[in-house]
Amino acid sequence: MDLSDVKVRIKRKNKIFFNLDSSCLQEVFAKCDSLSKLETASFMLEEVKGIKEILYIKFGDDILKACDLCERWFHGEIKMPLAIRAILKVHALAKESDDPYYAALLHAYGQALSCLHSKRHIKGLFIYELTALVYKYPDYEEYVKDKIASYLEHLGAIKIPEGKKAAFLLKEEK
């Protein structure tokens, strides 16, 4: 797996080490592009569980509230504005954070939750979560490779949650 573009961004002292052009993410992005909005949202609800646990310990109830509201939005129990406000609060926490690891993880969480509004936001999950891994682990390469493998595995085995779904998730994209 080619991480040379990541190494260049680290050397340049960029704050975000992955982007839409990162060669190591092209297969993940291609799989995401082929998903429906319902599949993308279902993937997100599973994928954010680990991030939610890490962030809850540090940031408390705002983290749980954002995910809970997004789950309720997914199931058609609430409308977008309530969930969006909670997601924006997550992004605000990221901007306030002095720790680049937590800032990146908060952005990953916020981007993932935002995929209910626009499925394109799911790519932000990968960009920011992998950036967080680079901040956390000086020898990041194996962690990044393992995480990308995990994304690909999960993208190949998406489980749609039981129960009612919001109508907007069931509409065909144009």
Image: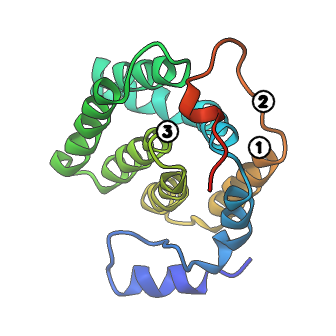
Q: Which residue is mark 3?
A: 116
Q: Secondary structure at mark 1?
A: helix
In the rendered structure, the answer to whether residue 37 lies left or right of residue 64 reads: right
Residue 37 lies, in percent from the top left, at 62, 43
Q: CA distance from mark 2 to mark 3?
A: 16 Å
Quadrant housing the C terminus: bottom right
Q: Secondary structure at mark 3?
A: loop
N-term mark: 1 or 3: 3
Q: Residue at x 64, y 43 (%)?
A: 40
Q: Which residue is mark 1?
A: 154
Q: Which residue is mark 2?
A: 159
Which label was assigned to residue 102? Answer: none
Q: Residue at x 38, y 42 (%)?
A: 110
Q: Residue at x 64, y 57 (%)?
A: 143
Q: Residues within 10 Å of mark 1 (few under 14, many from 20)?
A: some
Task: Give the number of the mark in front: 2 or 3.
Answer: 3
Amino acid under disc 2: Lys
Task: From this view, report whether residue 27 is shown above or below residue 97.
Answer: below
N-term mark: 2 or 1: 1
